[in-house]
Image (tube, grey):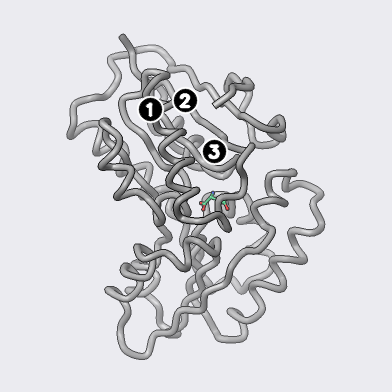
Amino acid sequence: MNKSIGLFDSGVGGISILNSLVTKLPNENFIYLSDNKNCPYGDKSQEEITILSIKNSKKLIELNCKIIIVACNTATTNCIEFLRKEISIPIIGVEPGVKPALLNTKSKNIGVLATKNTLTSELFNKTANNNLKNNIKIHEQIGYELVNEIEKGVSNNKSLKQYLRKYLKPMLENNIDYLVLGCTHYHFLINEIRELINKNISIVDTITPITNHVFNILNRLKIQTKNIGKGKVYVFYNGNPISTEFIKKNYKVNYLDF
Ligand code: DGL
């Protein structure tokens, strides 16, 4: 039986990771759960995020997945350890890339844009503090409303630029040279962000490292597909239909009650 790689997020954000994985592992089958009925996760309690993450993971196991990618920084930073205890298959999470930013900053100022629950989580603060060196300042900003707006669609969404301008201003005034995108949804704003910041500011997005990590784990656990043809990609949502701009032509998109 050919098992799939399962992913979940509160909405379309994790599709940024799905796209990258499909390119790197074209023979694998993928199942993506967009829990958009419960979007956003960013201001829910840790307990609620944990319950939703367990529900999504159990559904992915029921759908015959061999590994789960928590394609959501908020879910990862709030409950991955608990999830690993509860769920019997391997789980990979995604966290904001503060470490490379802290290691490489020259201006000694880095910005992190993420949800409230990511920024207040124990895991995020532990990673940040463990890598914090003298004189480096982390300028944190909660991306209020960004996830809700991205779910509506990025193209022609004027509110997004206004929010971004407001959120980036304090970071730019503090001379950041690294901007960490700590939410998978924000990957879809990279072009808009680039238009608002100076070219010498590096954007840290964790899509490539997580893709390589998944590739390595599949090899290490010897659970790569034996498929020689192209794999299938299923995207399921449980709320409003997903804006078509996030969906590649070959993805099969369906409603599923989960
Ligand atoms: N994509 C999720 C993340 O990476 C968004 C969380 C939310 O729904 O607020 O954190």
The residue under the point 64% across, 63% down is: 193
- When the figure is inspected, residue 245 is found, relative to residue 188, above or below; the finding is above
**Looking at the picture, how far across and down is residue 104, in whole percent?**
36, 74
Other-residue count near label 3 (Cα within 10 Å), few / some / many at <14 / 14–19 / ≥20:
many
Numbered circles on residues, count:
3
Indicate the secondary structure of the residue bearing disc 3.
helix
- When the figure is inspected, residue 227 is found, relative to residue 34, above or below; the finding is above
Q: Amino acid at mark 1?
A: Ile
Q: Quadrant of the N terminus?
A: top left
For residue 5, the mark is 1
Decide if residue 241 is on the left or right side of residue 143.
right
Find out whether the residues at labels 1 and 2 contact each other: C-beta distance under 8 Å. yes
Find out whether the residues at labels 2 and 3 contact each other: C-beta distance under 8 Å. no
The residue under the point 46% across, 33% down is: 56
Indicate the secondary structure of the residue bearing disc 2.
strand
Q: Amino acid at mark 3?
A: Ile
For residue 31, the mark is 2
Q: Nearer the viewer, mark 2 or mark 3?
A: 2
Marks 1 and 2, how far apart at CA: 6 Å
Looking at the image, the residue that sits furthest to the top is 1
Q: Amino acid at mark 2?
A: Ile
Closer to the N terminus: mark 2 or mark 3?
3
